[in-house]
Amino acid sequence: MLFAGIDALITCFGGFGLAMQLAEDKTTGTYWTYVAICFFGVSFVHHVLGAVLFRTTVGKFLLMTRVVRADDAGRPRFWQAVRRWLLGLTWLPMQPILGIFGDDGDPYEDGCGLRYVHSRDLRRR
């Protein structure tokens, strides 16, 4: 899950960096509103549009992993990527709680009909 960490850093630094540029000389409340909007905007562009257009995000690209449809290994569809992004926003923060209760299985794996594969596995097809 190293690629998830890389993608999270890009989202956090990108969101905060963009918010700092947009909310310059604004009040604290306005700044944090900009941070939230920029965080979700960067996350959406990176995880949804990256998956749809390039079949990868920056973290997955660095580790030679691609996002594909589970049924035919094709390019993810837009609404599949959106649903998976929303699932990630809800599932990932719950991991500390689910780990305490010994949750079996990984609901994010193959979530919304998408899965991760190594790039070399796609070339064999």
Image (cartoon, grey):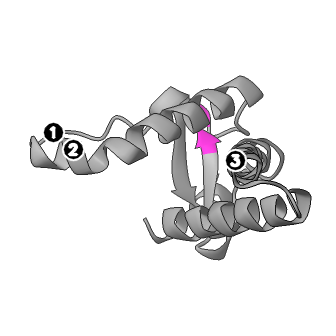
Residue bearing mark 3: 29
Seen as rendered, the residue at the extreme bottom is 62
Amino acid type indicated by mark 3 = Gly
Q: Badge 3, how many Cα within 10 Å: few under 14, some, many 20+?
A: few
User: Which is nearer the N-term, disc 2 or disc 3?
Assistant: 3
Q: Badge 2, how many Cα within 10 Å: few under 14, some, many 20+?
A: few
Q: Is residue 93 left or right of residue 58?
A: left
Residue bearing mark 2: 97
**Residue 15 on image: x %, y %:** 73, 59
Magenta span: 68-72
Q: Residue at x 90, y 57 (%)?
A: 22
Seen as rendered, the residue at the extreme left is 101
What whole-number distance in Å separates the C-alpha atoms at marks 2 and 3? 29 Å
Specify whether residue 123 is in view. Answer: yes
**Is disc 3 placed on a helix, strand or loop?**
helix
Q: Main secondary structure of the magenta part?
A: loop
What whole-number distance in Å separates the C-alpha atoms at marks 2 and 1? 13 Å
Between disc 3 and disc 1, the foreground one is 3
Q: Residue at x 80, y 58 (%)?
A: 19
Which of 65 and 8 lies nearest the eye of the viewer? 8
What whole-number distance in Å separates the C-alpha atoms at marks 3 and 1? 40 Å
Q: Is residue 8 left or right of residue 58?
A: left
